[in-house]
Image (cartoon, rainbow, N blue to C red):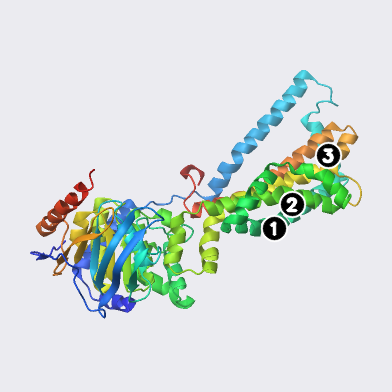
């Protein structure tokens, strides 16, 4: 594999949330808070603006509320206070398990998304094949989910969420259950798809290296209540590999802070 | 539009992309789970040979017992006596009439039960308050032997086919409704979330996600419903005879008992048993196998 050499990872730290004009921001979150019933605050005062076409990684320890935040952006849960605006309307979502419909072939799974998106029947088959080809699975269109490997299923799920043709793609630890080799490959695949389609991506993960490998902007969340405590912006100069020293250096820096956050929760 | 940009870029040959593709293809072929289907002939052979061998063994043992112990033929008839009873019932057309009558009632009763039980099941599965109210009653009805309804049915409907159908319905409807409820309950919540995320309306969610996802549970409810329908039918036919009620297998059984014709009784029991097995083998088993195999829910040995 030809690897890009000397990727400049300018990790610019900024404590404050980058103010950006409303026109270019794909997702705007203002003073968002969330609690379940009378329980403790899960999310507290999250104010955030995500630019169109940006690849944002939302990083935090397990149970810090990052998935809740994603679900709120997706419209699956309601915030207790504050508001979320997705400029392009609804967002596409991809979960940790592929959650393909087991009674449909890979192709039909994608076609169902196209159908629910309102694409006319005669165009669906070709469109589904094209989307599967985008994740290099055109040959597997007639296979059923149980005949596919975990990585293949996750790629079908990616094709399905791209079939929704929405400008924003939310991903909830989509590669957490995969082996390292497959995950590495899917990082590359996802990055390629992102560059090709210009989607805005919000990628939730608890894997620091993964965030450093993929994100243009990394948001670190604290736990109980979940708040955005720091963020890193990486000047995008092309693809980088997870083994590269830049990713490792940034990863170490983030890890140190993440550990500090976790330590502060000790009684 | 992302779809258009894709086709443009696909034409350009990017060596890095080609490399990624080949890498992915290699990993896919290493990790994919290939289906190893056995031929239809082999499968049928595997399914048919063992039960037939068992049948031959049982009949042989029975005949050996008759030859060795020489029991009174009116108390323990031999296989040939039973076979003769079958042949004589066949030759005076009683057997055909009884099988056709019972199958017709069983089949029609089952279809009506499906038509009633399915909406009830859907309502129970999707509407919590109704479920809390009706659920225990329905489970109770499933346990209650539907023969218990025969006396009441005779008083209400007299000796008519309505009595038979009523008893069949009381047997089959609860099973079918409960099967659908448990089928819906077992749907992984993630599938519904995907439906929501993909923008399915209420109707689309029900028809494109919930019903297909609940199909395996629903199907086992149907299977049990048929079993209950068939049993209830036999019970009703044995107890309620005469009037305008036609001549079914249960009636034939009861008639043979009144004539103290044990060979006839055993012959009829065997026919009832075989009709049940036949319906299972011809109607339910292949459908269920296809349903489960398509979803990868079948153990490797059963493929």
Task: Tell me: A175 left or right of A248.
Answer: right
Tell me the crowding category of disc 1: few under 14, some 14 to 19, or many 20 or more residues within 10 angstroms, Cα based. some
Q: Earlier in the sequence, mark 1 or mark 3?
A: 1
Chain bearing tag 1 is B
What's the distance in space between the residues labelled 2 and 1, CA to CA?
Answer: 9 Å
Mark in the foreground, 1 or 3: 1
Chain bearing tag 2 is B
Q: Which residue appears at 62% of the width and 37% of the height?
A: B51
- Residue pushed farthest front? A38
Q: Which percent across, then down, holds residue B130?
A: 62, 56
Q: Which residue is mark 2?
A: B169
Circles 2 and 1, Cβ within 8 Å, touching? The answer is yes
Task: Tell me: B235 left or right of B283.
Answer: right
- Picture disc at residue B253: 3
Q: Which percent across, then down, holds residue B128?
A: 57, 56
Q: Earlier in the sequence, mark 2 or mark 1?
A: 1
Q: Which residue is mark 1?
A: B116
Q: Earlier in the sequence, mark 2 or mark 3?
A: 2
Is residue B45 placed above or below A45 in the rendered structure? above
For the residue pair A170 and A19, the one nearer the viewer reads as A19
Q: Residue B104 sits in which quadrant?
A: bottom right
């Amino acid at each position: 594999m030809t690897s890009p050499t000397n990727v400049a990872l300018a990790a610019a730290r900024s404590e404050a949330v980058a103010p950006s004009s409303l026109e270019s921001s794909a997702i705007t979150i203002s003073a968002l808070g969330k609690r379940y019933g009378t329980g403790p605050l899960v999310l507290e005062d999250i104010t955030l603006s995500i630019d169109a076409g940006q690849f944002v990684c939302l990083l935090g320890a397990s149970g810090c509320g990052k998935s809740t935040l994603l679900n709120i952006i997706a419209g699956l849960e309601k915030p207790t206070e504050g508001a979320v605006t997705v400029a392009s309307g609804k967002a596409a979502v991809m979960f940790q398990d592929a959650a393909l419909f087991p009674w449909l072939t890979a192709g039909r799974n994608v076609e169902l998304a196209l159908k629910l998106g309102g694409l006319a029947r005669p165009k669906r088959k070709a469109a589904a094949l094209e989307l599967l080809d985008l994740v290099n699975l055109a040959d597997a269109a007639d296979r059923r989910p149980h005949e596919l490997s975990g990585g293949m299923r996750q790629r079908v799920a990616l094709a399905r969420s791209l079939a929704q043709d929405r400008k924003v793609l939310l991903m909830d630890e989509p590669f957490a259950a995969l082996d390292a080799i497959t995950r590495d490959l899917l990082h590359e695949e996802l990055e390629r798809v992102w560059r090709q389609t210009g989607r805005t991506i919000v990628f939730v993960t608890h894997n620091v290296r993964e965030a450093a490998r993929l994100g243009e902007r990394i948001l670190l969340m604290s736990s109980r209540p979940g708040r955005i405590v720091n963020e890193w912006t990486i000047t995008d100069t092309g693809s980088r590999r997870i083994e590269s020293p830049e990713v490792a250096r940034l990863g170490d820096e983030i890890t140190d802070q993440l550990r500090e956050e976790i330590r502060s929760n000790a009684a | 539009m992302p779809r258009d940009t894709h086709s443009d870029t696909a034409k350009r040959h990017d060596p890095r992309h080609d490399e990624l593709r080949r890498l992915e293809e290699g990993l896919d072929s290493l990790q994919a789970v290939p289906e190893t289907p056995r031929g239809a002939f082999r499968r049928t052979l595997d399914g048919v040979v063992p039960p037939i061998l068992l049948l031959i063994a049982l009949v042989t043992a029975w005949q050996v017992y008759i030859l060795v112990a020489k029991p009174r033929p009116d108390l323990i008839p031999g296989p040939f006596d039973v076979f003769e009873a079958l042949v004589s019932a066949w030759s005076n057309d009683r057997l055909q009439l009884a099988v056709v009558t019972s199958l017709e009632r069983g089949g029609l009763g089952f279809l009506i039960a499906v038509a009633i039980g399915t909406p009830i099941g859907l309502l129970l599965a999707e509407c919590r308050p109704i479920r809390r109210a009706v659920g225990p009653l329905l489970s109770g009805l499933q346990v209650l032997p539907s023969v218990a309804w025969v006396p009441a049915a005779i008083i209400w409907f007299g000796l008519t086919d309505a009595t038979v159908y009523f008893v069949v319905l009381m047997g089959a409807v609860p099973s079918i409704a409960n099967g659908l409820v448990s089928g819906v309950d077992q749907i992984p919540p993630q599938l519904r979330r995907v439906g929501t995320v993909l923008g399915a309306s209420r109707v689309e969610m029900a028809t494109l996600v919930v019903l297909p996802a609940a199909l395996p549970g629903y199907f086992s409810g149907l299977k049990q419903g048929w079993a209950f329908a068939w049993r209830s039918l036999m019970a009703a036919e044995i107890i309620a005879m005469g009037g305008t009620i036609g001549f079914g297998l249960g009636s034939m059984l009861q008639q043979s008992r009144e004539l103290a014709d044990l060979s006839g009784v055993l012959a009829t029991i065997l026919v009832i048993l075989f009709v049940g097995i036949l319906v299972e083998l011809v109607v339910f088993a292949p459908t269920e196998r296809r349903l489960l195999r398509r979803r990868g829910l079948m153990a490797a040995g059963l493929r």
